[in-house]
Amino acid sequence: MSLPLNSPESSSISRRTLLKVFGIGAIAGVTGYSRFTKPKPTIFQPDTLNLPRTLNTSKSVVVIGGGLAGLACAYELSQRGFTVTLLEKSPQLGGKIASWQIEAVGETFMMEHGFHGFFPQYYNLNSIVAELGINDHFQSLNFYAVLYRGDQYKPEVFRPSNSAFPWNIIDLAIASPNRFQWGINLTKIKHLQVFQAITGFQREKNYRRFDQISVADWVAAEFPQGLYDLYFLPFAKSSLNAPDVMSVGELMQFFHFYFFGNPEGLAFNGTKDDMGTSLVKPIAKSIQKHQGHILLTQQLAKSWLKMEKFTA
């Protein structure tokens, strides 16, 4: 329920408090976006090179490494008529998204490296999934929570948002149970400069200015502590970088891509089954269907022994 501006309750709110509470809204005004425009993310179109989709003559290619990037490369080449040989040193394909069978406590089940979520803006992966007809192997996570040690902060619950910057930040502020602990104070020029640097991200300019500063040093000097604790630190760690090593330039690019510059950045798609079953195997089967060859550790060893005998 809103209060009239001349009510006793509203008169007790100071100008400084208003600047703190509505700091995000002020930043939105500075950036010059219209509340009603809500621009959509730009999707880069395929190259317009005048090249044939498929080969006119037979060609062979070797792809080394069977992680997701190697699988995708081998898949795309096989679709275009190349005879592909995919080499992987591990006993299974997939790299970080590999799955393998184990036996424990009298049961057999699939093991993985850990949770994997795919952002909706992974457009190249999404196109492969659509071409393979395996969209039903994935499901959207309607929400997920980030929990914090101690009782200083309440859990943050993140939900997919279709609002473009800066309204995705405003939506986040409205939904956050910790919004009064973000520590933003626009009466501090340093805080305003921080948001100008992040929200007006320019890669070359930002890297020249911030690549020599660690995240830990930057936060100690001029960053709103609550905002760092609640969002930047957890998501920076998800990139497997320590804050005393990761540069501010890297962190700003990370957040620009995954959140500030993309309204889909807080959404996740997960697989319904293990990654091997849901994603790796369908790609591998398609490669083999197009006369591709996949050689894993044991097969590579056998091929090497045969080659040694032949050369001897």
Image (spheres, rainbow, N blue to C red):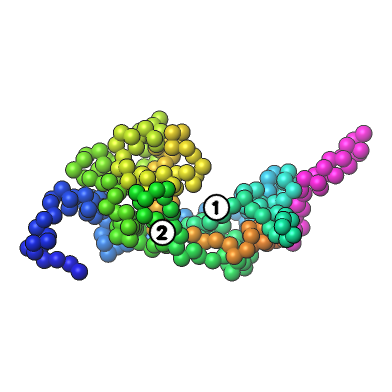
* Residue under pointer 2: 158
Q: Residues within 10 Å of mark 2 (few under 14, many from 20)?
A: some
Is residue 302 magenta-colored?
Answer: yes
Which span of residues is magenta-colored?
288-312
Name the dominant secondary structure of the magenta segment: helix
Q: Secondary structure at mark 2?
A: strand
From the image, state whether disc 1 or disc 2 is nearer to you.
Answer: 2
Q: Position of residue 253 (x, y in %)?
A: 42, 44
- What residue is at 18 percent from the left and 43 percent from the top? 187
Q: Is residue 215 left or right of residue 69?
A: left
- Residue 59 in view in this figure: no
Residue type beneath disc 2: Phe
* Residue under pointer 1: 49
Q: Secondary structure at mark 1?
A: loop
- What residue is at 41 percent from the left and 50 percent from the top? 148
Q: Is residue 72 left or right of residue 82?
A: left
In the depicted structure, whether residue 54 falls above or below residue 253? below
Q: Is residue 24 left or right of residue 114?
A: left
- What residue is at 17 percent from the left and 67 percent from the top? 2
